[in-house]
């Protein structure tokens, strides 16, 4: 017997003695599986079904945003006193955040939301974009997410940090999906977005982090 | 174990198909039988890969939740066990990625991030080195090595589960073994045991 074969045999023998599984906790696992399935049945509408509404939602959101922007522009042309007198909603995100980070965070979260919306609508097998088209934007957003997570913007804000953590995971999964094109990876992306309510949290965070136009005056 | 044999694709395809049909029709007993037939192998693989009971249970749970959610998509072109294992391997690899990501954030200064293979202080040197070497393999190589050399899967099963050709499975096993031999090459004396 050759040395390599002898070593392989010994490795094989030893490896079988490592991480030896205990008896499968069948009943316990079955209960957990049933409980998880029951909770999922009660969960929100699956992402794929929601995608049909994304186009309408984006259009509606754009219309609303335009309306709000026009409203704010018209208010700015009037004396500034009323604006200064109205206290901003207490959100916890922007209160303690320097203005520059607010802008960066708002821009980034907005870009992530747009990206995830497009991704949900187009992947997999979208008519306009291929899976590979998502890799580069996902990587760029991933880099910015990590930078923001380590910045003062997230240091003192637990909720924002948690959101950036979850965004990072979803973007990581998207890069994996874009590389492999495996639908199973897509499941992880959808699961990541749905179970962590990423879209909902992004949309909730956006109004609380003023956009460039609204904080411009304070910079 | 009897249930596993009864549902082995080679011995009782018809029984398995009947069970799948019944499960799709909402029969909880059929779902339970399908679960019982496959849960051991899934859990064992998850445990071998993660080395952690909680994580192995999470992976097993996730696998079967997905399997039952998507049972209607199973076309019967391959054995159900193959399909379940393709889900399981994906879930396990994803769990390993997540754990490594979290650990790297918590302990960025640590060089080794071996998930599932923590050398035991009291173990002989060879065993310790082997654990470390296995833990240091890339996840996909470790998956192939664990499935084939530890849990006894065939290359056909591994290829189907991981979505790669049989030749790739063989090549990855070859690479994994070579890396392990290389890692243990300095312990020639220990091989004489």
Image (tube, rainbow, N blue to C red):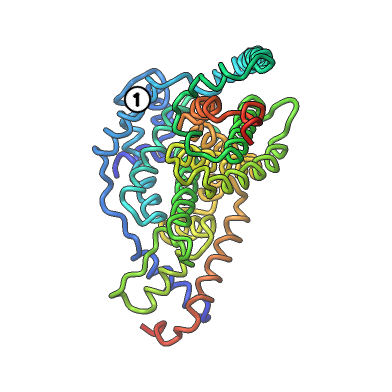
In the rendering, at what x and y percent does residue A23 appear?
Answer: 26, 50
The residue lying toward the viewer, choosing from B64 and A47, is: A47
**Placement of A30 over or under B40, stated as above or below:** above
The residue to which callout 1 is attached is: A39
The residue lying toward the viewer, choosing from A99 and A54, is: A99
The residue lying toward the viewer, choosing from B51 and A148, is: A148
The residue drawn where x is 65% and y is 45% is A139
Q: Tag 1's secondary structure?
A: helix
Quadrant containing the C terminus of chain B is bottom left
Q: Quadrant of residue B38?
A: top left
The residue drawn where x is 63% and y is 56% is B167
In the rendering, at what x and y percent does residue B135 appear?
Answer: 45, 64
In the rendering, at what x and y percent does residue A38 appear?
Answer: 33, 24
Quadrant containing the N terminus of chain B is top left
- How packed is label 1: few (under 14 Cα within 10 Å), some, or many (20 or more)? few
The residue drawn where x is 40% and y is 25% is B18
**Placement of A79 over or under B190, stated as above or below:** above
Protein chain holding label 1: A
Q: Quadrant of residue A158?
A: top left
- Is residue B73 in view from this perspective? no
The residue drawn where x is 75% and y is 27% is A128
């Amino acid at each position: 017997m050759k040395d390599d074969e002898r070593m392989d045999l010994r490795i094989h023998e030893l490896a079988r003695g490592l991480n030896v599984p205990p008896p499968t906790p069948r009943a316990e696992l079955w209960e957990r599986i049933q409980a998880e399935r029951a909770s999922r049945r009660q969960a929100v509408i699956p992402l794929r079904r929601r995608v049909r509404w994304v186009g309408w939602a984006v259009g509606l959101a754009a219309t609303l945003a335009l309306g709000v922007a026009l409203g704010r522009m018209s208010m700015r042309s009037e004396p500034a006193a009323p604006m200064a007198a109205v206290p901003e909603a207490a959100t916890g995100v922007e209160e303690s955040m320097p203005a520059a980070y607010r802008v960066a965070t708002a821009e980034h979260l907005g870009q992530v939301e747009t990206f995830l919306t497009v991704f949900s609508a187009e992947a997999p097998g979208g008519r306009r974009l291929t899976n590979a088209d998502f890799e580069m934007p996902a990587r760029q957003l991933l880099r910015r997410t990590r930078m923001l997570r380590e910045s003062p913007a997230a240091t003192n804000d637990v909720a924002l940090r948690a959101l950036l953590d979850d965004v990072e995971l979803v973007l990581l999964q998207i890069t994996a999906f874009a590389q492999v094109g495996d639908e199973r990876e897509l499941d992880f992306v959808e699961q990541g977005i749905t179970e962590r309510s990423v879209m909902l949290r992004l949309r909730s965070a956006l109004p609380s982090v003023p956009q460039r136009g609204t904080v411009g005056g304070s910079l | 174990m009897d249930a596993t044999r009864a549902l082995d694709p080679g011995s009782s395809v018809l029984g398995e198909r009947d069970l799948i049909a019944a499960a799709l029709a909402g029969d909880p007993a059929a779902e339970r039988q399908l679960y019982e037939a496959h849960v051991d192998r899934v859990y064992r693989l998850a445990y071998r890969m993660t080395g952690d009971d909680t994580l192995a249970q999470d992976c097993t749970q996730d696998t079967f939740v997905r399997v039952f959610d998507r049972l209607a998509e199973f076309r019967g072109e391959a054995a159900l066990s193959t399909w379940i294992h393709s889900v399981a391997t994906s879930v396990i690899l994803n769990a390993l990625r997540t754990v490594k990501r979290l650990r790297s954030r918590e302990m960025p200064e640590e060089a080794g991030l071996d998930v599932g293979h923590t050398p035991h202080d009291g173990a002989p040197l060879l065993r310790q080195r082997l654990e470390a070497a296995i833990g240091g393999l890339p996840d996909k190589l470790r998956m192939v090595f664990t499935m084939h050399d530890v849990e006894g899967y065939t290359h056909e099963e591994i290829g189907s589960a991981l979505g790669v050709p049989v030749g790739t499975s063989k090549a990855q096993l070859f690479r994994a073994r070579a890396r392990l031999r290389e890692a243990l090459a300095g312990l020639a004396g220990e091989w004489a045991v």
